[in-house]
Image: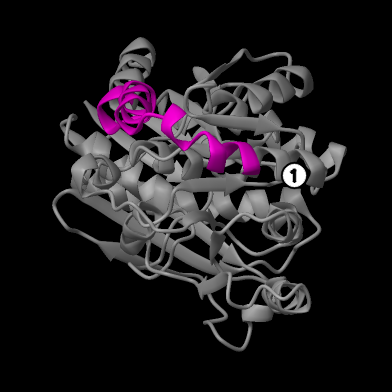
Amino acid sequence: MHILIIPSWYPKDELDLNGCFFKEHAHAMAESLDKVGVLSVTFRPLYHLFSDRLYFYREVELDGVVDTYRGFGINWFPKCHRAISLLHVYHGYKMFKEYIVKHEYPDVIHVQSSGYASFLARYIHKKHGVPYIVTEHCSAFQRRLVSEKASKYILSANKQASFCTAVSSALSDFLNAILPEKKWTVTPNMVCDDFFKIELSELKATKKFTFITVSMLNQNKSIDLVIKSFSRLVISGFDVKLHIIGDGPEKENLILLSNRLGLAKKITFFGSVARKVIPHEIVQADALIVASKFETFGVVAAEAMALGKPVIATRCGGPEDIVTKDSGLLIDSNSEEQMLEAMAYMVKHKPFFVPADIREYCYGMFSKKAIVRKYKSIYDSVKI
């Protein structure tokens, strides 16, 4: 079977983490299918005018595993979704014709996240009859970062899709409400095999109980709430540490907050780290915290569980499908009191959370083997 993946965003190189999960999915599927290709069209914001080319250009990466066709341009119409969708179709279709000269027609097109990618997939479907499926990842619709009118226009391109799925129950429910013409199912994100390759016997017991967060440092991630709760935990007598991995607009504010609360020796800010380093950092901790206001999935929670680590997570959309009573604690968003209680409980009841059991559950739900099997079934169901 031949699958062409059309993502709404995709990493430009190995250092670009934007869309890295889409790349991992493509390479995972390539191990089980005859052929997998990627066609990515990206229109950058206007502030790239002085750091990128002004005209649309293409790059082709032929590695023999997942041949990747990338196109880049400037988004000259940031407020006009119809205009930019037409540009996506125009340039994307030219790239598609170039793709099929070398690779022939795909059996199925897989759109990774709605947006302008769906318009391109729909156009190819109308012109050539290639069926397409859609996996939705984006929280922008739920968070009202896109207007209702724009959301309905963008999502309308999925009406001709043969199959629609979302990465969490909360997102699926939202999409079923806003686009009732389609039935949105749930297919979770995949946890990379690297997280399962580390032997549980390698997990190091820390002298001080260490919490870890791995995220962008923005207001949605609520790391300030984690720090405030952590401060109260320390004041109450717990000998604990907090590792914060990630970068973002709130980083300086969070460092100032940490210092103001006298936690400079208790909290370590690591900044951005390479993706391949993340599992080794999580291994050094005792529990992961996800404190977001919104998450469509929250793959870092599943990645921590793959390493046998328990998780404290807010009920923010995605973690409700990931964290069970045996693998962690779910609390309300924006509740400093519940976060404090959960952190204290985690320290006191560490033996209750069995690493081998947490990993086994995670493997059955989110491993490459489990997710590839689900998608192969979906592809087979829509292939003409």
Query: Magenta: predominant secondary structure element?
Result: helix
Q: Left of 262 or right of it: where is 19?
A: left
Question: Label 1, on which residue?
Answer: 293
Res 157 visible? no
Residue closest to the far bottom:
50
Q: Residue at x 42, y 67 (%)?
A: 16
Disc 1 on helix, strand or loop? loop
**The one of 7 and 107 positioned closer to us in this rendering:** 7
Counting other residues with Cα less than 10 Å from the Cα at mark 1, is it few (<14), some (14-19), or many (20 or more)? some
Q: Residue at x 69, y 46 (%)?
A: 292
* Count of marks, rendered view: 1
Amino acid type at mark 1: Lys
Give the vertical position of 361 relative to 348 (above or below): above
Give the vertical position of 167 relative to 28 (above or below): above
Q: For the C terminus, which image quadrant?
A: top left
Give the vertical position of 193 relative to 74 (above or below): above
Q: Residue at x 22, y 46 (%)?
A: 198
Q: Position of residue 349 (x, y in %)?
A: 52, 33
Range shown magenta? 344-370
